[in-house]
Image: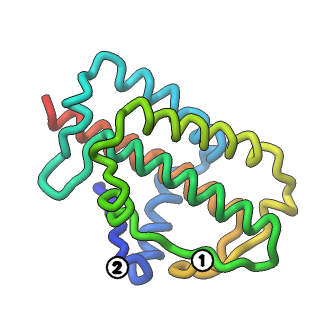
C-alpha cells in the first residue's frame, strides 16, 4: 500500500491515515521502531551515490533525500507538539502542509549530511525525552487541528507507524532507481 497524506485533504482523510499508520505499527513498541530508524538508514544507504538519493520516485514524488528531510521535520513537529502537551492543558496542535514544507524549505537541495544530521539530533533528543515519560504524561492530550484530541502515547504510536511508512517508501524509491 502506498500512503498519501496531502494537506488539502488532511482533515477528510485523517481517520484513514491514522488507522493505516496504527495498523502498520501493530503491536510493536513505537519507541523501539523509532530507535531503529537511523541504524536502518545508515545500513540501507551505505554505498548509494547521492545522485541516486536525489532522484524522485516519479514526477511530483519525493526522492530519498526529501524523505529523510521530511522525517527530520516530522521529528521537529512531533517534538514540539509533545512538549506543548506536556506543559500546557489541551493545547492546540496545528497541522502543517508537508509538501509545502518540502518546496519552501528546498528539501531537494539540502546536503544529505545535513538532513541526516538534523534527523539524528532531533531523534536523539526526542527519544531521550520520550523514553522517560510516565503513564500520566503519556495520557496527556492536545487538540490536533485536523484529527481532534490526541494523547502523547497516541502521537508516539503514529510516529512509529510513520517511520515504517517512510522506510517502505525509501525501499520502493531505491528499487525503482535500479
Which of pointers 1 and 2 lies earlier in the amino acid sequence? 2
Residue 164 in the image: above or below residue 150: above
Q: Is residue 4 left or right of residue 125?
A: left
The N terminus sits in image quarter: bottom left
Find numbered disc 1 in the image and state the secondary structure of the residue it sits on: strand
Question: Measured along the vertical axis of the image, is residue 45 above or below residue 68?
Answer: above
* Closer to the camera in the image, 115 or 59: 115
Q: Residue at x 45, y 45 (%)?
A: 164
Front residue of 111/126: it is 111
Q: Residue at x 27, y 46 (%)?
A: 108
What sort of colour scheme is used for the picture? rainbow
Image location of residue 15, percent across then percent down: 47, 75
Please tell me whether mark 2 sits on a helix, a strand or a loop: helix
How far apart, in angstroms, are the residues tagged by discs 1 and 2? 15 Å
In the rendered view of the protein, which quadrant contains the C terminus? Answer: top left
Tell me the residue at 23%/40% (across/down): 173
The residue indicated by pointer 2 is: 9
Neighbour tally class for label 1: few under 14, some 14-19, many 20 plus, Cα within 10 Å: some
Along the viewing direction, whichever of 88 and 108 lies nearer the viewer: 108
- Quadrant assignment, res 136: bottom right
**Image coords of residue 44 (percent x, y):** 37, 25
Image location (x, y in percent) of residue 149: 66, 79
- Which residue shows up at 39% across the image and 46% down it? 166
Q: Which residue is mark 1?
A: 144
Q: State the image coordinates of residue 133 (x, y, percent, origin top left).
A: 82, 51
Badge 2: residue crowd in 10 Å (few <14, some 14–19, many ≥20): few
Q: Is residue 23 rendered to the left or right of residue 91?
A: left
Can you say whether 61 is above or below 97 in the image?
A: above
Amino acid at each position: 500500500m502506498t500512503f498519501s497524506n496531502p494537506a488539502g485533504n488532511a482533515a477528510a482523510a485523517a481517520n484513514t491515515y491514522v488507522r493505516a499508520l496504527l495498523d502498520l505499527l501493530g503491536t510493536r513498541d513505537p519507541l523501539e521502531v523509532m530507535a531503529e530508524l537511523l541504524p536502518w538508514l545508515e545500513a540501507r544507504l551505505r554505498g548509494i551515490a547521492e545522485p541516486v538519493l536525489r532522484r524522485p520516485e516519479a514526477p511530483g514524488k519525493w526522492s530519498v533525500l526529501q524523505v529523510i528531510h521530511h522525517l527530520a521535520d516530522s521529528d521537529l513537529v512531533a517534538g514540539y507538539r509533545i512538549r506543548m502537551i506536556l506543559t500546557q492543558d489541551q493545547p492546540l496542535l496545528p497541522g502543517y502542509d508537508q509538501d509545502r514544507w518540502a518546496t519552501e524549505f528546498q528539501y531537494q537541495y539540502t546536503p544529505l549530511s545535513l538532513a541526516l544530521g538534523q534527523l539524528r539530533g532531533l531523534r536523539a533528543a526526542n527519544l531521550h525525552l520520550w523514553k522517560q515519560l510516565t503513564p500520566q504524561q503519556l495520557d496527556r492530550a492536545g487538540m490536533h487541528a485536523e484529527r481532534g484530541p490526541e494523547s502523547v502515547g497516541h502521537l508516539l504510536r503514529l510516529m512509529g507507524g510513520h517511520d515504517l511508512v517512510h522506510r517502505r517508501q525509501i525501499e520502493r524509491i531505491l528499487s525503482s532507481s535500479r
